Image (cartoon, rainbow, N blue to C red):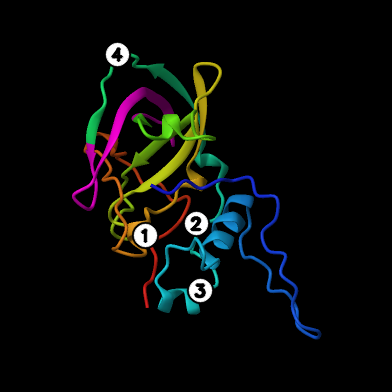
């Protein structure tokens, strides 16, 4: 599972030859520019070499503040770690950290938010939470396997979910990756037209 870090000090600082102009990183939000910069960088991009050659930027839904919601976090401290299935034989040791309750487009929804056993001991990610979800755009406007959102453990009992930062598993771009499969209980019976759209492979 690859984690998207929103805070970057610099995107690109390479010098171009005289007479050339630096091609700006595409995106209308910081999240969009950051993920585009990462995917454009061959050293960390999940894209196949043939797709990277023509890559200019991912397709996003237009930013919509409707999809920035404040969720109530109900902790589930007694939950045990389980083997979350992935797209390969690998399993990811996860536990339900809590249940997020929120309103979206006039309806109330709940999603489980997960905590990874390995990431808890990884420097910089001790407070990382994993929010995978499915919705009615999957398989049409967005990747069929659902999308992910990165969160951090809050100080209180509320947490901001910005669906505009929903991104695809690396498996959407390259089948060599092992990606956690979104649990069925994290299905939202609505369309989430925010975040990264389905990828058009070449």
Q: Residue furthest bottom?
A: 19
Spatial CA distance of label 2 from label 1 is 9 Å
Disc 3/disc 2 C-alpha distance (Å) = 18 Å
Tell me which numbered mark, 4 or 2, is placed earlier along the sequence.
Answer: 2
Q: Position of residue 120 (x, y in %)?
A: 43, 29
**Image position, residue 123 (x, y; %):** 52, 34
Quadrant of the rendering where the C terminus is positioned: bottom left
Q: Secondary structure at mark 3?
A: loop
Instruction: Answer with mark 1 or mark 3, whichever residue precedes in sequence.
Output: 3
- Foreground label between 4 and 2: 4
- Region of the chain picked out in magenta, as a range: 84-111
Question: Is residue 47 visible to us here?
Answer: yes
Residue for badge 4? 78
Q: Nearer the viewer, residue 58 or 177?
A: 177
**Residue 25, quarter of the rendered image:** bottom right
- How would you classify the magenta stretch by its main secondary structure? strand
112 up-or-down from 80: above or below: below
Is 80 situated left or right of 65 in this image? left
Q: Which residue is mark 1?
A: 141
Query: In this picture, is 29 found above or below 157?
Result: below
* Residue located at (53% from left, 23% from top): 154
Q: Which residue is mark 3?
A: 55
Kindly check if marks 2 and 1 are in contact, taking CB atoms under 8 A apart as contact. yes
Residue 193 horizontal/vertical position (percent): 43, 51
Q: Disc number at residue 61? A: 2
Report the residue at 26% width, 45% height from top: 181
Q: Are the residues at dot 4 and dot 3 in contact (C-beta closer than 8 Å)?
A: no
């Amino acid at each position: 599972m690859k984690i998207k870090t929103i805070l970057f000090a610099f995107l690109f600082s390479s010098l171009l030859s005289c007479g050339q102009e630096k091609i700006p990183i595409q995106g209308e939000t910081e999240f969009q520019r950051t993920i585009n910069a990462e995917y454009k960088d061959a050293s960390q991009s999940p894209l196949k070499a043939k797709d990277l050659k023509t890559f200019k930027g991912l397709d996003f839904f237009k930013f919509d503040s409707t999809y920035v919601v404040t969720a109530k976090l109900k902790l589930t401290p007694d939950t045990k770690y389980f083997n979350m299935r992935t797209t390969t034989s690998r399993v990811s040791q996860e536990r339900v950290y809590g249940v997020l309750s929120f309103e979206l487009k006039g309806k109330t929804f709940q999603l489980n938010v997960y905590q990874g056993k390995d990431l808890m001991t990884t420097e910089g990610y001790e407070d990382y939470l994993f929010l995978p979800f499915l919705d009615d755009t999957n398989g049409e406007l967005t990747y069929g396997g659902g999308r992910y959102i990165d969160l951090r453990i809050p100080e209180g009992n509320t947490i901001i979910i910005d669906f505009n930062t929903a991104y695809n598993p690396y498996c959407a771009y390259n089948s060599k990756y092992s990606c956690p499969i979104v649990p069925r209980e994290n299905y939202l019976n609505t369309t989430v037209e925010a975040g990264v759209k389905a990828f058009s492979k070449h």
